Amino acid sequence: MKFENMVLSVVHHTHWDREWYQSFEAMQIRLRDALRTVVKRIEQGEIDSFYLDGQTCVLDDYREIVSEEEFGHLEKLIRSGKVSVGPWYVLADEFLCPPEACIKNLEIGRRMAKKYGSFCDIGYLPDTFGHIGSMPQILKEFGIACAVIWRGADPKACEVLWEGNDKSRVAVLVLSTRDGYYQTFLKHETYEKELDAYLEFHQSKDGWNCPVLFNGADHTICSGDAMQKLRRYGECRGIRIQEVLMDQVCENLLKQNFQEVIKGELRDPAKIYVLSGTWSTRMYLKVLNQKCGDALIHRAEFLNAWENGASESDALLERLWKRYLVNQAHDSICGCSIDQVESDMKNRYRRLMDSVEEYEQAVLNRLFSYHYPDSSERNRWLHVICNTPYCNKRLIEARILINRAHDQGSVSLYDGEKPVRLNVVQRTEKEEFFHDTQLEPWYDDVVEYLVEFELEFKGMEHICLEIRPCSIREEETKPADMIFNDYYELTAGKRGITVKSKANGRIYENQHVWTSLPDDGDSYTFSPPPKALPVLGRVVRSECRKDSMKQTMDITWLLELPPHPSEEGKEEKVTVVTRIQLLDGDPMIYVRSRVSNQAANHKLRIEFTLPAFLYHESDTAFDLVKRPVRAPFPAAAAKGEEAAVGQDPTSSQIYAGDLQIVHIGMQEYEVERSGEQCVCRLTALRCIGALSRRDLRTRGGGAGPGYQTPDAQGNGEWEFEYGLIYGPEFFTPEHAVRLKTEPLVKQSCCRADRELRLWIEGEPLYSSYQFSGGHEVLRLFNQQEEEETWTLHFGEKKRVWLSDLKGQKKEFLGDGLEIVITAPGKKIITVRMEKS
């Protein structure tokens, strides 16, 4: 027999999307019933073991709605090795997951798995829409040596090595059939023929040395007679059938003599769709996701580290991370779910931000108390903490309250006896409600000042300013025809803006042009009609003005879209109001756009025309990928195929010729050659009304159930923040971090000395500053291919180790006030600091 003497390993599993074509609450009930059946089948001997989809969030979800006794049955099976869990907390989308969230996902998932006695360390990534190039490095840093993947790779063999961006390698089992982990034929009467076809396909591969059958599918579990069928089948064909858990798959995989290597980012759609249209579906969710992630890292985790864990908030922070991570699930953050899921996600993001904001205020109030019951006590100090390790000047916005009895009409700020340049944006007399768990609630009459001012920071630094009431000063605001600073001159035209670079003398016309292209796609895939022409926005209003702090250009665009065939004669408009600001001594152009979308079935983008170039770069989690400039995308896709429609992923940075774009959550862009120039387009919205369709021009088949999703049309108002930098001499990853972070500000009755905690010489990408295992932990990333040297400076002597992502010390770097770090190309650098 052709399969004689084969040993076929069977992994019983389910792939569990927490929410998708049903809400989380509905799926949670289904999860309860599924796991009850798993427990029953194992206890009755119908199956020997079960793999719980590589994510431990299902344990939290299950525990919420069953008794302790019932959960105990599952826990007993986990501890006895019958059910395997982890290593992730949730199966997340890699391209839409911020770097630190990827690490927290493994950190929390592995900790939970070990808590329940399961030690399955495998990079299980069965359904992710492609894979980031840093994943092998991340897995190896956690001590994980092998992975299972499906989408994005179609090698000749089934067992290969995957080489990451830093040359780290992990052993990989590639699910090679078009349906991958989704194997349900044991529930069919024709299972023998289907299993024959499955085995024959794999034997045609260059290598299938670890024959594995993944017996399961989305939201379903194996049938009770599955093993009876397999044993009968094996007896007829001379095959030995063995039930295994994923750790045994790993053991077998690591013994192989690999002949093939796949490298870096994996986005090949040859075998199965990678569905990159999800980077722009419901873009506003991506923006919320980035803002919440930044709040967790640069406010909550930063403050916990700044006060050396004094608030004892480890349990709280883990809970906040879990709340955040469940939104990272690849059918959630991708936007390819029903409208109820979108609504639930927005609510979860809002609740998370409420928690972070209250935690921030609690920590800051503990550090710098505010006294309110006694109106004679003046809260005359303003504390400002810079939460990045870069030397930079920041424009800071703050809210200052003055008791009405002490108000003189305005306020000023002093650093010692040196006045700080300040602009009062708004003054309001109001009644303020004060509340504190240690004091009685209080109402008081105050004057609220919204101010902006500039401070220079050397790095992570705390500066205490004095607030002094003063008489009213007239702030001079001048109208102008253009705005400028030391780096640029900007003028508005009929379609966009013109940027003149003072550094290289170049004039860049047709910048920041709003365009819309029809889209007949669905939540997974962009699909423009044949010969579709873009609608260009026209400038209907522009105004420039200058004050003491900045120069501002306000522009209003109008896009009038032709009616969609399904909306007979309906007028469709998109209005965009953009505020562009220039600061003295700052090479970044700050942009904030508010989009009012009343149109459907279109893709809204911001277009930049630039001198020609061959390659562009964009970042994903712990990577910066060089990408070729493409020609226009193919006209159509054949059945079962997916057209490459030109878009690329970006986490927060894009480098396109003379332009660097940094952004908050605008995670799709494209670069296309146009004659002697290149055009870079940053996506703002992709408006579509179907979860999945089977009649797309750019994808030859469906990608999910065909539900209608009217909310995915994105009607309403949405805000986007991004920055533009012209001239490679000014490019730096610092711009992306600066756009996403704001110094922390707290008014107080207490004065404190200036403190400089940490600063860096060099240009690493700063990722996080946290408190873990009783010590400060700093994470950086070298975006470049070449080795770089950085110097870390400390405000007090530190003993410093290089550590892995598990938190284990790898190398002692030194003891003192400064440490020199040599960072290999594309390397994640985690530094553990202890008081000397």
Image (tube, grey):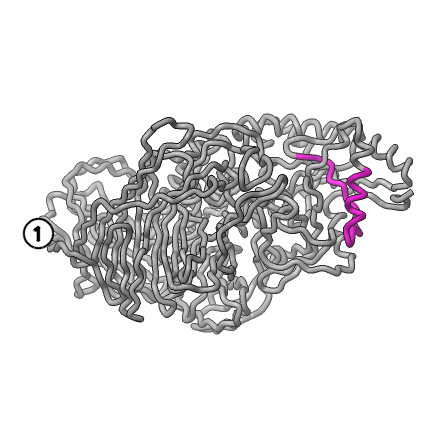
Amino acid type of the residue tagged 1 in the rendering: Ile
What is the quadrant of the N terminus in the image? top right
The magenta segment is 196-217
Q: How many marks?
A: 1
Where residue 658 appears, as percent x and y from the top left, is 38, 64
Does the stretch in magenta take in 161? no
Does residue 319 sit above or below 631 in this rendering? above
Q: Which residue is mark 1?
A: 472
- Residue 583 or 463: which is nearer the viewer? 583
Q: Residue at x 65, y 57 (%)?
A: 143
- Residue 2 or 517: which is nearer the viewer? 517
Does the stretch in magenta take in 211? yes
Q: Residue at x 78, y 60 (%)?
A: 257
Q: Is residue 470 left or right of residue 694?
A: left
Where residue 395 appears, as percent x and y from the top left, is 26, 57
Q: Among all residues in the image, which is located at the extreme front?
A: 531
The answer, for residue 335, to whether it is visible in the render is yes
